[in-house]
Amino acid sequence: MRLRLVPENTNWDFFRFARLTFGFSIFLVALSLVLEAVIGLNYGIDFKGGTTIRTESAQPVDVGTYRQAIAPLDLGDVSITEVFDPTFGPEQNVATVKIQAQEGDESVAAETVNAVQDALRVIDPNMTFPSVESVGPKVSGELIWTAVMAVLAAIGAVLFYIWLRFEWQFSLGAVAALVHDVIITIGVFSLLQIQFDLAIIAALLTIVGYSLNDTVVVFDRVRENLVKYKVRPMQEVLNLSINETLSRTVMTSGTTLIALISLLVLGGDVIRGFVFAMTWGVVVGTYSSVFVASNILLMLGTKRDWSKPDANQGNQFGNVDA
């Protein structure tokens, strides 16, 4: 007996509220852009420059006490955050201390890091510092530009690939879905002020690949059915194709989410931002494959017949004497 999360023969109309779902997607994209412009992103040390020191102590973390200990160093903007994680033991009290890049310095001075560590050891002589990350202002600016180019290059490559494999209407639908996924994911990070660093860029690129894979599966079935049912309306062909691939979509997304949610809960705070981005990306990527990419294909239309390859192709010289 096989497990079925979706009935074997579904006949759901995914385009019954096409205008509503497409309008909702446009609203979310617009809202995300507004959030990014007004609130902005909580850039991590990779993109902002500075130093992040991770502390671990047997004593409970008191943010006020930490701040008072560092204040005499006059380091400018200092952010201190206690880290909560269900995997930590009762004597693992972890915090992160973020120090802005010092003006005029191309790299963060080791003396600054040592001074902060010495100041914090006054609170707890046994305090340890599991990790220290430093990025200079010039490097952080280059990383921002490189990250933007990486995402744009990935989307451009997808546009070219889909155009070659299908038709330009399919290509625009797939790219619109990818842009939709990336912008909304960044909007969620802006709204929740989750730290945005290079790991999140890696997650965005992974989301692009995952969403593309889901969209290509649907589009492959659409192309097959367009050849098979030449007189059926485009909306019926799209509905049929999505229903036929629905079981695969639900199983793939469901099993991926099970693994991601496990990592989100038990994986620790170091990878939590990356896993959160992936979890959200799987959900929004599955949604966009149906309600964005397919909607755009329905609006643009496409040809209903692809010329079949010549059955004699490759045999045209079969009757020539050797």
Image (spheres, rainbow, N blue to C red):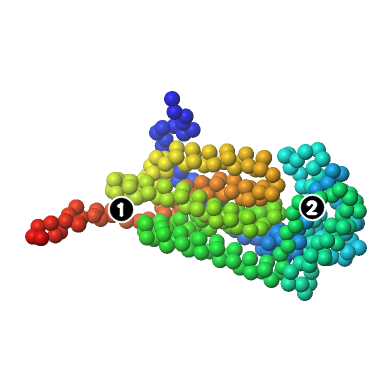
Packing grade of label 2 (10 A; few <14, some 14-19, many >=20) is some
The answer to which image quadrant residue 113 occupies is: bottom right
Packing grade of label 1 (10 A; few <14, some 14-19, many >=20) is some
As helix, strand or loop, the secondary structure at mark 2 comes to strand
* Image quarter of the C terminus: bottom left
Q: Earlier in the sequence, mark 1 or mark 2?
A: 2
Q: Is residue 223 left or right of residue 203?
A: left
| Amino acid carrying mark 1 in the image | Arg
Residue 42 image offset from top left, x and y in percent: 71, 58
**Residue placed at 30% from the left, 53% from the top?**
304
Q: Is residue 94 left or right of residue 322?
A: right
Task: Tell me the tag on residue 304.
Answer: 1
- Mark nearer the viewer, 1 or 2: 2
Q: Is residue 31 left or right of residue 314?
A: right
Residue bearing mark 2: 129
As helix, strand or loop, the secondary structure at mark 1 comes to loop
Q: Is residue 172 or residue 64 the one in the foreground?
A: 64
Q: Is residue 256 or residue 307 the one in the foreground?
A: 256
**Residue 314 visible at all:** yes
